[in-house]
Amino acid sequence: TPKRDKLNIPHPARILAVGPPNTGKSWVCGQILMRAHPPFEELYVVHPDKDFTKEWAVLGAEMLTEIPPPDAWEGLVKTLVVIDDLEIKQLCKEQARALDRLFGYVSTHKNVTVYLATQNFANIPAAVRRMSNFWIIWKINDTDAMKICSKKAGLKKDALTDIFEEHLPNHHDSLWIDRTKDSPWPLRVNGYEILDKY
């Protein structure tokens, strides 16, 4: 059998893509989507301005403005749900619950991979963060936030700062943390370059 592409992340996955504006979060999510094997049969994107954003429409995504409740998912086909640029901190109680259930129940029981792309790590609910098995992080210019993010990712307090200084010099560089059980590539740069010493 051919070797699995490092961007072909085992399904179902719960992926966080966290970084400042214009770092390439949506582009990276698109790259992962295109390398999924077998491909996703259904693609939904939850975006606050679904009629304005065009980047997902070209991939044939069904655009939504709200996260559907758990009973809306049938689980019959391999499905991807992308949550892009939602103001997570401002979600109403019903939507916050739908987000929690999407990560905690729908993904694992209803054949759904979830990508959550957001600019602010602190806004991700703790339960969603804990249920995520894959993190993609771009450099955060707030040193304290980097230390908190590092600890929450299961690394040493200053590890993220050190890794970005040593290995990720460019604005669009990202660190990939694969927390999937027995992952052959738990830590990498830009998806492909494996880091061993952290």
Image (cartoon, rainbow, N blue to C red):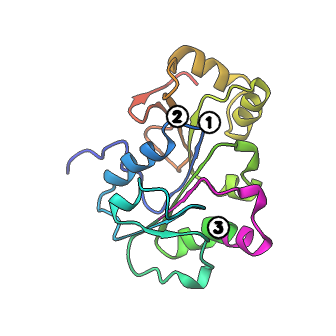
| Image marks 2 and 1: residues in contact by CB distance under 8 Å | yes
Q: Is residue 198 magenta?
A: no
| Disc 3 versus disc 2: nearer the observer | 2
For image coordinates 75% across by 75% down, the residue present is 94
Residue 83 in which image quadrant: bottom right
The alpha-carbon separation of the residues under discs 2 and 1 comes to 6 Å
Image location (x, y in percent) of residue 61? 40, 66
Mark 3: which secondary structure?
A: helix
Give the vertical position of 128 relative to 74 (above or below). above
Quarter holding the C terminus?
A: top right
Residue at left offset 34%, top offset 55%: 36
Please tell me which residue is depicted at 55% across the width and 14% down the height of the picture: 166
- In the visual, does 69 lie left or right of 6? right
Which residue bears the numbered disc 2?
A: 23
Residue 144 - label: none
Q: Which residue is mark 1?
A: 20
Amino acid, disc 2: Thr
Bin the neighbour count of mark 2 within 10 Å (Cα to Cα): few under 14, some 14-19, many 20 and up: some
Tag shown at residue 104: 3
Q: Secondary structure at mark 2?
A: loop
Badge 3 crowding class, 10 Å Cα cut-off, few under 14, some 14 to 19, many 20 or more, is some
Residue range corresponding to the magenta coloring: 81-98
Classify 153 as above or below 94.
above
**Badge 3 amino acid:** Gly
Task: Return the residue nearer the eye: 44 or 105.
Answer: 44
Mark in front: 1 vs 3: 1
**Outermost residue to the left:** 1
Secondary structure at badge 1 equals loop
Q: Position of residue 34 (x, y in %)?
A: 32, 52
In primary-sequence order, the first of circles 3 and 2 is 2
